[in-house]
Image (cartoon, rainbow, N blue to C red):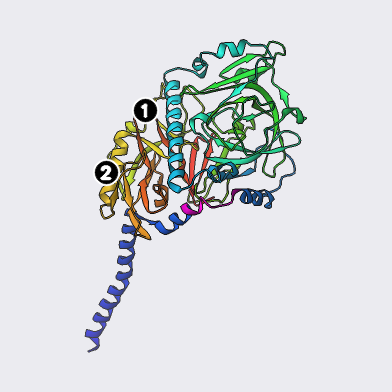
Amino acid sequence: MQPRTLPLLLLLLAVLALSPRAAVSRHHSQAGATETLDVAASLSRARAALSTDAASLHQSAAEASPVRKHSSRSRKDSGGLTLRLHSRDFLPEEQGRHQSYWSLVLSRLSRDEARAAAVSARAALAADGVTRLDLRPVNESAVFAASAAAIQGPVVSGVGQGSGEYFSRVGIGSPARQLYMVLDTGSDVTWVQCQPCADCYQQSDPVFDPTLSTSYAAVSCDSPRCRDLDAAACRNSTGACLYEVAYGDGSYTVGDFATETLTLGDSQPVSNVAIGCGHDNEGLFVGAAGLLALGGGPLSFPSQISATTFSYCLVDRDSPSASTLQFGDGVGDADTVTAPLLRSPRSNTFYYVALSGISVGGQPLSIPPSAFAMDATSGAGGVIVDSGTAVTRLQSSAYAALRDAFVSGASSLARTSGVSLFDTCYDLSDRTSVEVPAVALRFEGGGTLRLPAKNYLIPVDGVGTYCLAFAPTNAAVSIVGNVQQQGTRVSFDTAKGTVGFTPNKC
């Protein structure tokens, strides 16, 4: 019996040894094709977004222990600067403005349509060789020619475009006044509302008064910083620099250009930062006192402090939690997905990423490379990574391919009517969790960023309607929005020419 028993035992051991590997293989195959959406958890966050006490939330954040300490800081030393970020919808001024989550979402989407249109227009105008200097409003010449007594420096940054979904507390002046500032990777000029205020929009904090700051100083017309502006002029009586920034939708900002001291988080103050100071401010923007420009131009905050690397992580917009913006700290985790950072030959404001394709359900979509490519001569097309745009925009053909593949893979889910710019929505009111097709962004160089399900199937009404959070565009440029960036630390290294995406690093 022994000779016959041994082969049987060996065969049984071989079967048992192979079974677990087969099970693991099936699990990996399924995991590669689908992502789990926790419906119950996301609906809970959505409902809580309307009831969170923002005032006590931000007071607690202000009283929290510092992120880290530094002994000194010069304008050229950006290493380790860190500050906290908050979602726009948890600013004190935003609380109570919406009676339902549906109303909140429609407000977000309305702002987002304006923002995406403005970013696309600015990129297209730059590719066509149209500068911001060419976009002066029809009455601008009278403003620039006016006397010092008549000029009040109207300021409208991306406010009318709905830009600004994430904010931070930034200290302005000496002594520092803590103000909410919107963070914008699509802008190069930092600005703040100033007293005396002829026409200011509502903000959470008192309007900044430059006469109370010992570090405020006007920039002269012959200063290199004044010459770095796309459009500048002089006050007739003082020779102080006036600036203008115009946008693709016709909105603009005009005001005094000055240097001031900025304090970020617990770091030492950063002196001699060029900012705009506005006294007549218009737009649809509420809450923040101004804008911290994170674009790639010479006057952006990273450029002024010589920071070749910075990163941010954006928490879920329905979460009251804070995330961080960091300067000077490179991201080198093993999980980091790295992609080439591209720059337009016509404009250095925006950060472009070398996107090569998209996968749905683990399968690459049939999208021609031209849908994501930037023209090397004009800078037309390409894919911008933007902190202010919410929903990722794809050229219509690329979006159709993504949508059709997703719909095919989610055929078991109940469809419902579209909402605003979303045409692919589902009724998940009777589900606590669902499996949905996995969506991944593929970059030149081989990197692949797999998105969590909550970053592309989002609630829109608080009762179970979810929509695919991508949208088509007829513009040449595509935009990776902040909904798809949530929960991922996005890093820019201008020295190495790379964009990094590190999941779960907030």
Magenta-highlighted residues: 46-54
* Helix, strand or loop under label 1: loop
Residue 295: % across, % down: 54, 31
Does residue 217 sit above or below 35 in this rendering? above
Residue 369: % across, % down: 32, 34
Q: Which residue is mark 2?
A: 404
Q: Foreground residue, 13 or 57? A: 57
Residue 98 is one of the magenta-drawn residues: no
Residue 421: % across, % down: 36, 38
Upstream in the sequence, badge 1 or badge 2?
Answer: 2
Residue 186 in view here: yes
Picture residue at 66% right of the left edge, 17% below the top? 241
Residue 368 in view here: no
Which three-letter amino acid code belongs to the residue tagged 2?
Asp
Q: CA distance from mark 1 to mark 2?
A: 21 Å
Q: Which mark is residue 476?
A: 1
Which three-letter amino acid code belongs to the residue tagged 1?
Ala
Question: Alpha-carbon neighbours of circle 1 within 10 Å: few (<14), some, or many (≥20)?
Answer: many
